[in-house]
Image (cartoon, rainbow, N blue to C red):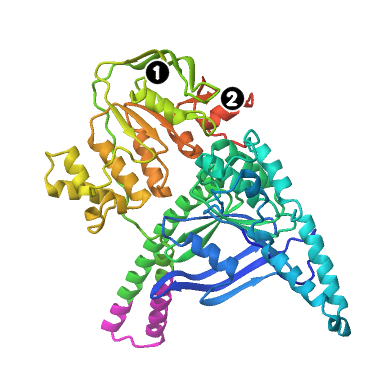
Amino acid sequence: MFINQLSADRLGDNMVRELITVEGVDRSFGPVDVLKDINMIVNDGDRIGIVGHNGAGKTTLLNTISEQKQDVGDIDFAPGIRLAYLTQIRDIDSNSTIEEELGRKGRQFQELEEEIAAIETQMVDPSFYDGDWEPIIERYSELQQMLASSGGGNVAGIAKGILEELGLDKHPMDMTVSSMSGGEKAKLALARQLVGLAGVDVMFLDEPTNHLDIQTTEWLEAFLKEFQGAQLIVSHDRYFLDQVCTRIIEVDNLRAWPWKGNYSQFIKQKIATEASLADRIKTVEKKIQSTMGALQQMKRANKYDKSISAKHKMIERLQQEQKALRNRVPKKRKPLILNLEATDKASMDVLHIEGGSKRFEGLERPILDNQDLEIRKGDRIGIVGGNGQGKTTLLKMINGDLKLDSGVRDLAPGCQIGYFHQDHATLDFNLNPVEQIEVLRPDFQYGDIRAALGRFQFSSDQVTSKLSQLSGGERARVALLKLLLEENNLLLMDEPTNHLDMDSKDTLEEALIGYEGSLVTVSHDRWFLDQVVNRIWELQDGVITTYYGNYTDYIRAKKGLPPLGEDEISEI
């Protein structure tokens, strides 16, 4: 996160200000255009979600605006505004203790302290007072007040308070950061980075929910909704965008398209707009054809008068409109094709655990404490709980990878399990995608394998690259294809939407909704849970509490609210 201080008087607090104006901005890297003709205004209080497929240029848009590094066009900041940036790469020193990490000042104070230090250097020079020194001293006092109000003098104390709210105050302050889990490190970094936002006008956030559990994400949502300044947020978390954002910017085909409302409203508007756009293009094409036909008839009749010129101009205008409309059509990318079919071998009773218990040495609370669990045909169960509660461990016990300390696990005859690991552990990283499928299905011809990989968006270069060299999203698609080609009727999926872009998430959700077997999934993706599951298992201190319905139904039940009606929209 960084702070950029611009000197000038601020407008009255009661006025809605234009904080950032972007006009006609282009950005490229070498010969590759990334952004083209970007136009937008950021007003005081805006919470803008920036969405688009992987590689569309979302982070580039954030960096271009915040750093004013456009190739063409203008990016203007209102006088006196302060900017902050929360990056998706957590700035954290794993070798330090929690105490040391909390006390380490982030980049949000760097420019303030550098300007203060520069003025102090001038102040020790006696000749400084020979000139017009009073405005500089006033600026020095202003900076000191700004640093104090931002918490610069008590970073560790404020960060500790945030850490307590995030449930991490149980750890001793001399504990090394390297001993913490990935989720705990993310919370620690978040606590320190959120210090110093008092007086900030615009905050840029790049994937702020990465590695956070649901409880911490919900805390962050509440924090951002109370934050008084404007926000520009890049995120793949659709539920988060629904909760926080008041506007959406879609980066597609080098452009930034504005939409009103949150993510759900954006999707509805986009579907309606694309349908209307297609109809309008057809109408314009018919007008062009009709006008050109009339023009040809006039020429054949030798009617060369002013109407000929008018027809030519009409065709030119219609062709320009046609071009503009086609530029609005979203760039079509090769879709992920996924059709999961369950083998018809399982009985209605799929798996049963009776009196299941599991403990790990050194851990005070149990992972599972004398619990009875049942999975039936057609169940789609989402497992939720805080980081470290044992959600993935529970999946491993259901799969039989980990033995219960006590209790009985009874898997029905004919039940065949397919397992999607969040670290893609079922894949051999020394193989390329073709070789991985050959191991699974030796009966497949090479052409069949290439066709299957093509349906999963793999290019000719990617299919010959080792899995270790592929991105997380590419490996996730190989793991999904592996599930598709296996025979199974019980799917166990651990964070299946990690690394997938929004289009691929939609495709996965559609496939799982149509899956006729049973599903048990661990996921921090609340949108995914809302679309897919019909039951929630909440795991807390070894006890599983069952809630019927999807994630929103679970949250409403926790708050004592009734389930939503068919056409109702959740306000929680």
Q: Residue at x 29, y 35 (%)?
A: 340
Q: Is residue 305 above or below residue 410?
A: below
Please tell me how crowded label 1 is: few (under 14), some (14-19), or many (20+) other residues with Cα within 10 Å.
some
Q: Residue at x 13, y 48 (%)?
A: 446
Q: Residue at x 46, y 56 (%)?
A: 52
The CA distance from mark 1 to mark 2 is 30 Å
Is residue 565 visible in the rendered image? The answer is no
Q: Is residue 409 above or below residue 259?
A: above
Question: Considering the image in quadrants, where does the N terminus appear?
Answer: bottom right
Q: Is residue 307 magenta?
A: yes
Amino acid tagged 2: Ala
Q: Pointer 2: what residue?
A: 557
Q: Give the overall secondary structure of the magenta segment.
A: helix
Q: Position of residue 482 (x, y in %)?
A: 26, 39
Q: In which quadrant of the rendered view does residue 99 lie?
A: top right
Q: Is residue 141 above or below residue 546?
A: below
Question: Between disc 1 and disc 2, whose residue precedes?
Answer: 1
Q: Callout 2: helix, strand or loop? A: helix
506 or 27: which is nearer to us? Answer: 27
Q: Position of residue 41 (x, y in %)?
A: 62, 65
Q: Is residue 449 magenta?
A: no
Q: Which mark is residue 188?
A: none
Q: Residue at x 51, y 46 (%)?
A: 210
Q: In which quadrant of the rendered view does residue 125 lie?
A: bottom right
Q: Position of residue 302 (x, y in %)?
A: 29, 86
Q: In which quadrant of the rendered view does residue 108 lie?
A: bottom right
Question: Considering the image in quadrants, where does the C terminus appear?
Answer: top right
Q: Callout 1: helix, strand or loop? A: loop
Please tell me how crowded label 2 is: few (under 14), some (14-19), or many (20+) other residues with Cα within 10 Å.
some
What range of the chain is rendered magenta? 295-321
Q: Which mark is residue 404?
A: 1
